[in-house]
Image (spheres, rainbow, N blue to C red):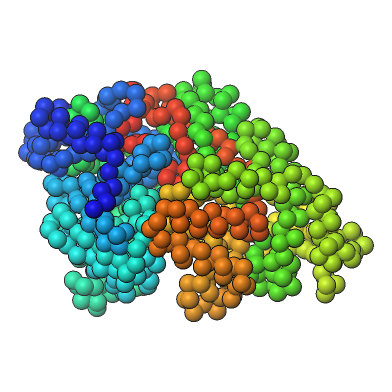
Amino acid sequence: MLKRQSWIVLMVLALVVALSGAGLAGEAPMLRERVESGELPPLDERLPVEPYVVETVEQIGEYGGTLYMVAQSLAGFGTDMHVLGIEPPLRLSSDGVTVLPNILRDWETEDFQTWTLHFREGMRWSDGHPFTAEDMMFWWEDEVNNPLITAAIYIREFQNAQLEMIDPYTVVMTLDRPFPMFEYTLVTQWGYLGQWWRPKHHLSQFNPNYVPEEELLALAEEEGYETIQQLWRAKAGWSAKPFDAGLPVINAHKLVEKRLDTWVWERNPYYWKVDTAGNQLPYIDGAIVQHIADAETITAQVVSGQVDIEVWHTSLDNFSLYRANEESGNYRTLMWSSDKGAEVMLMPVHTYQDEELAEVFQDVRFRKALSLAIDRDEINEMLYFGLATPRQFTLHPSSEFYNPEWAEVYVDYDPEAANDLLDDMGLTQRDSAGYRLLPSGRRLAFTAEYWPSEPETKTPMMELMVDYWGELGIDLALTPQDRSLNAQRAGANEIALNLWHGGHVIDIEWQINMQPPLPSSGISWGPGYNAWYEDTGSENAVEPPALVKELYDLADELRVETDPGRRMELGQAMWQMQADNLFYIGTVGMAPYPIIVSNDLRNVPEEALWSALWLHRYHPEQFFLTR
C-alpha cells in the first residue's frame, strides 16, 4: 500500500502527541470570555482529537488585533481570502516539494485509482456543528452530481467516479481510471473550485434534494434570483470564498458582515489548528476589508500605511514608490521569488474566427518571427528593473521535467531573422505605409485584447510590442477590456491575440490539467481546439491538425500513467513540443514579486515563493499583530 507520508508528516504527528500529553495551552481572550459566560464550550471540546500543529515563522504569536486590507473585488479572490480563508484538504510544504496533511489527517492508495481519505476526528464547523465525511458526501451527491446545481463535473477524472463513506471519518473515492495527480488536486485552492465539502446541516435548506423545487424557486424569486442554481451559488459561494455571511466555514476566520463596500471577518472559535505551544490559532481576531475599485487608490492606501498586508494588487513597476515610503508608511517591502514562466505570455490564436489570419497564426514561422522581434533585455530593464529573466515560456526551473534549453529557444533579439521568416512565408508585399499584406491583399493587422491586470505591466509591455512588431511590418492594435468580457470573447474565438501571465508551471500545478502546454477553453492559443477536445458540442469547436492532436494524445497518456520513468518521457515530450512550436510566446519571467507588510504584522516569511498556491502554504493563521 502506498502511503503518501514523509518524515515531515511524522514530525507533525510527534508534535500532536507531545501536545496531547502536555495539555492545551491557550485561546484568544475574546473566546475565553465567551467560554466563561457559557456561550462557548471549553477549548478542549472545540478542537479535534489531533489538531494540526503549525510551526511559527518567527515566534509564538500574540492574540488580538484587526487586520486592515483592501480589495478591487470583494466577490473575487484577493488578499483577504489568501490571508483569511483557504484550507485545502492537503497542504504543500513551504519549500513546495512535499504534500502534507491538512484537513485530511492521512490518505492512501494502492493503484492511483482508489483513494482512501481520512478526516480529523472531532473537527467542527464555525457554528460548532460536527464536520464529518457526511459533508463530503453532501458535496458530491447533492451538489456535484445534482444537475439543478452543477451543469458538468469540473475535473474530467471525476466523471463516472464513485464516493463511498466508510465511517464518519473515512471516505473512499474510486475513479474509473488511474489519476496519479489526484493528491495534487487536494493541495491547490482550485482543486475542485475550492470545494470538497459543504456544511450539510446548513445548506440542505437550499438544496432541491431536500426541499421541493417550487419552494426553492419561490425563495429564489424573493431574494432576486431566477434559478435554483443562482440561489445556491449565493448561499454556498462558487469557490472557497464564502459569499453569505451566514455560511459556516472551517477556515481560520469567518465572514460576519457584508456592507456595500466593506466585508468584516472574525475568528472562527472552532478552528482546528494550534501552535507548537498548544495555543489555538488564529492569533488575529478579525479583519476589515474595504472595496476600492481603482488600482491607483489602492496603491495610495498601501504606501500611506493604511493597509496591513497587500499581496494581490502590487506591482514591480511600483517598487521604487514602495521603498521610498516604507518609513513613513510603517511597512516593509518583501521581494518574494516568482514561479512565473513568463510575466506576460503571448498567444496568437490558432482557432481565430478570421480564417486567413488563423492560417498565418498556425504557421510556426510566424510565431518564431514574433518571438525573435521581442527585445527582452529592454523589457526587463524598462519594466522590471533588470530583475526578471529574459526567457521563453516554459516550465519553472524547479520542475523535475525542466530542460534549461527550452528557456533559450528564439529569445535572442534578431529582427533580421524575424523578417526573413516572414518573407519565407510569402508575406513579402507591403502597403504604402510599409505594413505587410496578407495573400488576400489585406494589411497584416490584428488586435491584442486583454485584461490589463495580473500583471499591470501588460499594457506598457504591449505598447513596446506594437513597436517591435511594427518594425516587421505588422500592424498591432491594443484593446484592454474587462476580464469577463475578455474571457467570453476568447472562448468564442473572437480574439486574435490573447495574453496572460505565464504561471501554473510548477509541477504541482501543470500536471493536474496540463493547461499549459495544452490550450484552455478561454484565454489561450486554441480555445476552439479545446472545445473540440472536450467534445462539448460547442459551435466554437475547431478540429485541430495532426500536430495538436499528438499533443493531446501525450496528455491523455500522461494523465493515467503511473510509472515515473514513462511519466517523465511523456511530460518532457509535451514541453519539447512547446519549445519547438511556441504555442505560447514568452517574454521575461520569474521577476521578484513585491509583498507589502506592516511592521506591526509578524510571522510573515521574509523570503518565499509567490505562486498560484499563494499564501496558504505559509500558514497565515500564525500571522500576528504587535500593535
Dividing the picture into quadrants, the one containing residue 389 is top right
Q: Quadrant of the C terminus?
A: top left
Q: 584 and 451: which one is in front?
A: 584
Residue 29 is left or right of residue 316, and the answer is left
At x 46% / y 29%, what residue is drawn?
A: 607
Q: Is residue 225 visible?
A: no
Q: Residue at 83% across / 62% down in the picture?
A: 424
Identity of the residue drawn at 53% across and 74% down: 532
The residue drawn where x is 51% and y is 35% is 337
Where does residue 452 sit, x and y in percent of width and height? 60, 51
Instruction: Give how far across and how far down residue 496 sits, in percent.
Output: 67, 64
| Image x and y of residue 282, in percent | 26, 35
Q: How many marks?
A: 0
Left or right: residue 273 versus residue 476 is: left
Side (left or right) of 14 relative to 499: left
- In this view, the residue in front, 36 or 570, is 570
Where does the image place residue 233, in percent across and percent down from the top left? Answer: 34, 63
Q: Is residue 369 or residue 610 the one in the foreground?
A: 369
Answer above or below: position of 488 versus 318. below
Q: Quadrant of residue 362?
A: bottom right
Find the residue positioned furthest to the right: 432
Most foreground residue, 380 or 312: 380
Horizontal relation, residue 72 to residue 97: left or right: right
**134 w.r.t. 330: above or below:** below
Q: Residue furthest top?
A: 327
Q: Is residue 342 visible?
A: yes
